Amino acid sequence: MKTALITLAALLTSTVVHAEGLPDRIKTAAKVVVANQPNYPPMEYKDPATNTLMGVDIDLGVALAKQLGTKVEWADIGFEQMISSLETGRVDLIHSGMSDLPKRRDTLDFVDYMKSGAQFYTSAARKEEFKTPADFCGKTVGMSRRTSFPDETAKWSAANCEAKGLAAIKVVGTEGSADARAQLKQGRVDGAVQGSETLPYLMALEKNTYAIVGEPITAVYQGIAFSKKDPALRDAYAGALKAIMASGEYKAIFVKHGLEGTMLDGIYINGEAAK
């Protein structure tokens, strides 16, 4: 961790980033290949009318690549295959709503770019039944099995339900967040969990459909993931992020998507502020 921060020190003293900071393979290819699965609005999704990629991660990824003097080639890869695709060189980095979790840092380095958290919600029709997260004790709650939410919800249940003599939350792993929402609408689950940054968008899109319950039960960073064998690319992206933060472009992207409250106040590597 300290080594990474020391390596970044000189780079982060300037907000001017050039293509020279990129690995030779990126400069030769004149592009960076980025793993992304566009099924997590407003972070990444496709416009249903035009099939165009949209979202915070898409706008941010393009802005960072432009700052580095290169272009993005988005690779639509399932979340489960992203890390292996990075390790085998199929992609250069992962930028797809991935949480910077300690267990992932054994194989990945993260340049963090926003705050997030696991958020309980239910259907608008049942909002009077669920006033606080504790009301889900003993209930069935759906969430994507591809995320950290099942483990986080189980831990929260152990501390806030079982430890207080209440029944445990019944965690249902779904095929994705969209599947969890479908099961909620069908009445197959009592509630659901997904990233706090996504719910305002969904509630605006599907009015009077969902109700947020309480505050997020976790606080995590989302980050752009790099192979630990690729510190030069990590450092180049950290410098580019600092540059667009200074220029105001970073804030403009988050304001555009209504997510000002998730912005970071500086550069964080693997969850720690760069010195």
Image (cartoon, grey):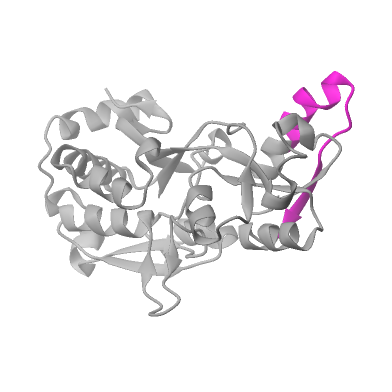
Compared with 65, 137 (above or below) is: above
Could you tell me how many numbered marks the image carries? Answer: 0
Q: Quadrant of residue 52?
A: bottom left
- Answer yes or no: is residue 89 visible: no
Question: Residue at 55% of width from left, 65% of height from top?
Answer: 78
Q: Nearer the viewer, residue 19 or 38?
A: 38
Residue 212, position as x, y percentages in the image: 61, 42
Using the image as rendered, state which of residue 122 and residue 165 is in the foreground.
122
Q: Would you identify the image quadrant in which residue 183 lies?
A: bottom right
Q: Where does the image place residue 213, in percent across and percent down from the top left?
A: 65, 37
Q: What is the residue that sits farthest to the bottom in this orientation? A: 50
Task: Report the span colored magenta.
Answer: 154-174
* Residue at the extreme top: 164
Q: Position of residue 152 (x, y in %)?
A: 67, 36
Placement of 228 over or under 269, stated as above or below:
below
In the image, residue 133 lies at what x, y percent? 71, 33
As displayed, is residue 94 above or below residue 193?
below
Q: Residue at x 78, y 51 (%)?
A: 172
- Residue 2 placement, left or right of 115: left
Q: Is residue 27 magenta?
A: no
Q: Is residue 170 visible?
A: yes
Q: Name the image quarter holding the C terminus.
A: top left
Q: Which quadrant holds residue 166?
A: top right
In the rendered structure, does residue 173 fall within the stretch colored magenta? yes
Q: Is residue 228 left or right of residue 238?
A: right
Which residue is depicted at the point 34% across and 47% down?
230
Viewport quadrant of the N terminus: top left
